[in-house]
Image (spheres, helix red, strand yellow):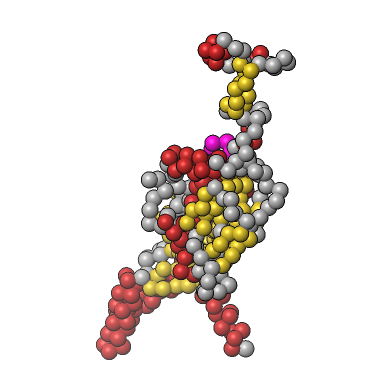
């Protein structure tokens, strides 16, 4: 019974709370002083003044309660946002009372039991009226952003009490890792190192693959006139296959607790690398832990990979002694790809990437910008 009673009290406190403001505390002390004076002197004027002050306290609580009753909230959050990147969230508040307006409403987002001040204030909300509010929303960490509800506070009518009410209003959004700038020199170094291990082949594309002598049946549009004029021999150009532009990012998720910051930096670097390679037209694949995507291209594929990184979690090593191994091998992967391994902890050995073009230790990225 005692536990059940405590649960009821806890729910009541969560949904309704009242505390004195500094002005209210002064007013209450002054009321107490007037009451003591009335009892000591027996003066009717003191009793009249005491009754008036007590009625003001009672009226303040009743009016504030009616201001906070029968409100309705609807919120809208974008499905996807990026860490440290402000987006616009919207909140609609409606007064469901048929006769009484609401005054001086301060609105707070509630997440994990904490009130988050967004600077939202509604001075007056008439009966049956609604108000559309928008405000900037910034998340400093990747992952699932959850808003549990809205806390409404008011000091109306006399500013003696701060009364709060809680209204459940769920809102969820997926926060992707922040996209940081990468220098062109860094990207060129990574891609150049990867191309040393890639198997180039001819096909439909725009990049030059080879020059050879003209053969019967060749398309006349492929004739390379500059070389033909210089050598006096009819020469055609062959282009490199467009699907040559493949890149695979492997993110190791094994790291001890002390490397939590390094792991977050590794996730951010992987997301930034995917973003910049996608803008260059690369076919991308992501491997992180047990997740292995297929090669794909385009904005929708990139967003799918960023969603995976948004929910990626660090896995602690099985033992603090000796190196840890992480298996990574897909025999169906094509040879003509750039493979970049991002490792947050040097104690991890990535099995299956012996021929990896690039191995990046994220520990070197902490405290340093991505642009040299």
Kindly identify the residue that appears in the image at 37 percent across and 66 percent down.
Answer: 159
Q: Nearer the viewer, residue 270 or 58?
A: 270
Kindly identify the residue that appears in the image at 41 percent across and 65 percent down.
Answer: 155
Give residue 235's position: percent from left, percent from top: 61, 16
Left or right for 250, reference 86: right
The quarter of the picture where the C terminus appears is top left
Write the start and end of the magenta stretch as one range: 279-283
Kindly identify the residue that appears in the image at 43 percent across and 40 percent down.
Answer: 185
Is 282 magenta? The answer is: yes
Rendered position, 366 above or below 112? above
Give residue 110's position: percent from left, percent from top: 51, 63
Q: Residue furthest right?
A: 217
Splitting the image into 4 quarters, where does residue 328 fall?
A: bottom right
Q: Is there any visible trace of residue 48 in the rendered image?
A: no
Splitting the image into 4 quarters, where does residue 216 fall?
A: top right
The quarter of the picture where the N terminus appears is bottom right
Q: Nearer the viewer, residue 328 or 119?
A: 328
Give residue 93's position: percent from left, percent from top: 54, 54
Q: Is there any visible trace of residue 210 in the rendered image?
A: yes
């Amino acid at each position: 019974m005692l536990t059940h009673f405590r649960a009821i009290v806890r729910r009541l406190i969560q949904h309704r709370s009242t505390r004195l403001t500094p002005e209210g505390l002064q007013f209450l002390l002054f009321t107490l002083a007037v009451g003591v004076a009335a009892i000591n002197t027996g003066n009717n004027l003191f009793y009249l003044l005491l009754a008036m002050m007590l009625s003001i306290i009672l009226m303040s609580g009743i009016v504030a309660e009616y201001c906070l009753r029968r409100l309705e909230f609807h919120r809208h959050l974008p499905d996807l946002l990026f860490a440290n990147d402000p987006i616009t969230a919207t909140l609609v508040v409606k007064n469901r009372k048929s006769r009484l307006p609401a005054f001086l409403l301060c609105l707070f987002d509630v997440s994990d039991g904490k009130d988050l001040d967004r600077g939202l204030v509604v001075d007056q909300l008439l009966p049956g009226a609604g108000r559309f509010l928008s405000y900037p929303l910034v998340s400093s960490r990747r992952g699932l952003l959850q808003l549990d509800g809205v806390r409404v506070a008011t000091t109306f009518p006399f500013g003696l009490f701060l009364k709060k009410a809680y209204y459940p209003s769920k809102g969820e959004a997926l926060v992707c890792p922040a996209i940081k700038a990468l220098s062109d020199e860094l990207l060129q170094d990574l891609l150049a190192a990867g191309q040393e291990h890639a198997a180039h082949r001819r096909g439909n594309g725009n990049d030059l693959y080879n020059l050879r002598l003209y053969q019967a049946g060749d398309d006349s549009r492929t004739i390379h006139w500059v070389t033909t004029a210089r050598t006096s021999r009819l020469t055609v150009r062959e282009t490199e296959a467009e699907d040559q532009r493949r890149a695979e990012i492997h993110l190791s998720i094994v790291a001890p607790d002390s490397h939590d910051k390094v792991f977050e930096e590794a996730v951010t670097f992987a997301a930034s690398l995917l973003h910049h390679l996608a803008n260059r037209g690369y076919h991308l694949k992501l491997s992180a832990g047990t997740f292995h995507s297929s090669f794909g291209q385009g904005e929708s594929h990139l967003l799918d990979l960023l969603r995976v990184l948004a929910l990626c979690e660090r896995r602690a090593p099985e033992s603090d002694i000796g190196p840890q191994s992480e298996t990574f091998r897909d025999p169906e992967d094509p040879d003509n790809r750039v493979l970049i391994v991002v490792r947050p902890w040097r104690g991890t050995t990535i099995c299956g990437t012996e021929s990896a073009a690039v191995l990046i230790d994220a520990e070197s990225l902490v405290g340093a910008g991505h642009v040299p």
